Amino acid sequence: MEANYRRGAKTRLRLSIRRKKSNNIYKYNAARAVGLPCSTKNILPTSRTTEKESILPNVEIIANITESSPESPEIEKRKTVENNDFPNEEEIFSATEPSLAPIVKGNKRNSTSAVSIDGLRVVDLQKFIESLKTLSTHSTLFGCSLVNLQVVKELKVGYQTKLTFKCDMCGFSKSIHTCPESPQSVDVNTSAVTAVMNVGGGYTQLVNITGAMNIPSLSFSLYKKIHSEICTAWEDLAWKSMKEAAEEEKMIALQCGSVDVNGTPMITVVGDGSWAKRSYRGTGNYNSLSGTAAIVGLKSKKILYLGVKNKYCCVCQRAKNIGTEAAAHTCYKNWNLSSTAMEANIIAEGFCASLEMYGLIYNKLIADGDSSCYKKLLDSRPYETCTVEKIECSNHLLRNYCNKLKELSKMRGIPGSLKNILSNNILRCRTAVVKAIKYRRSEANTSLEDNIKNLRKDIINSVSHIFGEHLNCSELRYFCEKTEPDQNNYMSDFRTLNLDEKLMDAVRYLAGHSRSLLENVTTNVVEQFNSIIAQKLGGKRVNYTQRRCYQGRCYCIAPERQYKKWKCVN
């Protein structure tokens, strides 16, 4: 046997062996003697042979080992024989350690062949490049580089991919991650689930997005596991952020001297609720399976209390439908009454827990026109030293005022000309009230009670001024100086149709809230909370009330408003 063990070029082997017949199978005994495990499957014909014919001629084998794949080379073998019973043939063999010795296995592929990777992957580019740099210098003995590395294994866990590289020259093997985990960053799968929850989507939306990008997606079981972990983390972080917000409100109250007789800080809060299902005005469709409500500090504009009520648990309900007992699970059903009562109950719970949780008294509540919420507070009596005062949201008062005027303009039995006059002046009626509030708030030398009294007169006189009657304009002085009605006095026309009393009922109701209007406060800070919830629920077009999903998405808003940046939250 002649062999040339040159690295970096073809290795040429020349073997001269004698072929023997044994059980009609011809083996290369000489090749086996030198550690070259060769075999053929050429079987002699069944014709009889003599003893002389059993000694076969020599076979010359020439094997070329190609450097292009040093670890699993292709060896071209050419046989030359003198007997016509054995035609020329070519076979392909593989070697396991070509860099050390020409050990050849016949008719077998190398088990470390490269795997095919289809599609795109999510990659942390900087860390992945650093990992490739370490692989490029894995061996200096044989001069290996990235060219000699092959991906022999790919392990996908969601959007995280683990690639195993193996060197064709020295056999070095190492695995690297496309997105390595670190304490400073969040796992890519957690980030993906967090992102799709924040934009109001779910598992289906996530799979559709990544599928369109040709990125293999994570399984539903992994999504559920990560979803549960995210909801738990959001809830824990929400309570932590609410405690920090309460400390901030307490410090502001102490600085302003707003305390009760026992020295307990008293603050003004804003409260409102929302539901998982849209209920359009006038439909009476108030049967949402889940609802939430929040209490926000007026000064800090941060959430102090957040509650969620659920009327439904899919695990319990499915077991009930088939008449069996539900399996052990965490049940999030915590409400059995009507959906409309959720808001008042959550607000009352927040007031009753304020002293125990934060050592604060919520002495004033800014809310909309829902009277049931305030009645629930009065019945629960959360504080012994004071009674909670309710301040109506000025936006809700003015909006309801305009809605009543719109309804009057659509009444039957009224001439179209008067309908147009009333509908065209609705915005002017609202503007007159807003200007009156601004004027009375600017009076510094007048007591609060006088301002409330004067504002009430201004609101009642506003429609008389707008529709040309000018009944009390001269008395109020700043409206106008007219003492006589205009030529077009539409109030007299309204009286003939008995429309003036209905108009004045709406005006008197608004004037009755002059104290709240002088405060000039709104529930916008909680309305923002409600709008963010709607965005995270996909516009309330998707049912996220099966188990925990609705509750988790509600709790994520508290730390979002507290810390502002998602990077800090994560």
Image (cartoon, rainbow, N blue to C red):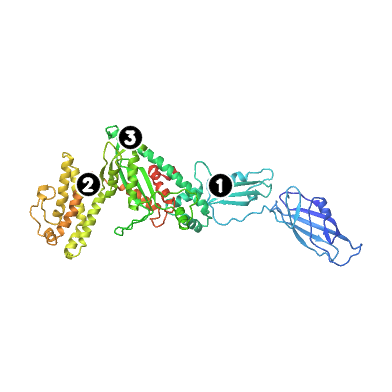
* Alpha carbon separation for disc pair 3 and 1: 48 Å
Nearer to me, 130 or 477: 477
* Alpha carbon separation for disc pair 2 and 3: 28 Å
Query: Going by the picture, which residue comes out furthest to the left?
Result: 484
Q: Is residue 207 visible?
A: yes
**Mark 3: amino acid:** Met
Q: Which mark is residue 251?
A: 3
Percent coordinates x, y for residue 327 in the rendering? 50, 51
Picture quarter containing residue 139? Answer: top right
Front of the two marks 3 and 1: 3
Q: Which mark is residue 505?
A: none
**Mark 1: amino acid:** Phe
**Mark 2: amino acid:** Leu
Would you say the residues marked 3 and 1 are in contact, meaning their CB atoms lie under 8 Å apart? no
Q: Quadrant location of the C terminus?
A: top left
Q: Residue at x 20, y 43 (%)?
A: 441
Q: Residue at x 53, y 46 (%)?
A: 126
Compared across the picture, whether 553 is left or right of 382 comes to right
Compared across the picture, whether 43 is left or right of 410 comes to right
* Alpha carbon separation for disc pair 1 and 2: 61 Å
Percent coordinates x, y for residue 231 in the rendering? 45, 47
Which residue is denoted by mark 2 in the rendering? 517
Element assignment for label 3: helix
Mark 3 or mark 1: which comes first in sequence?
Answer: 1
Percent coordinates x, y for residue 242 in the rendering? 38, 41
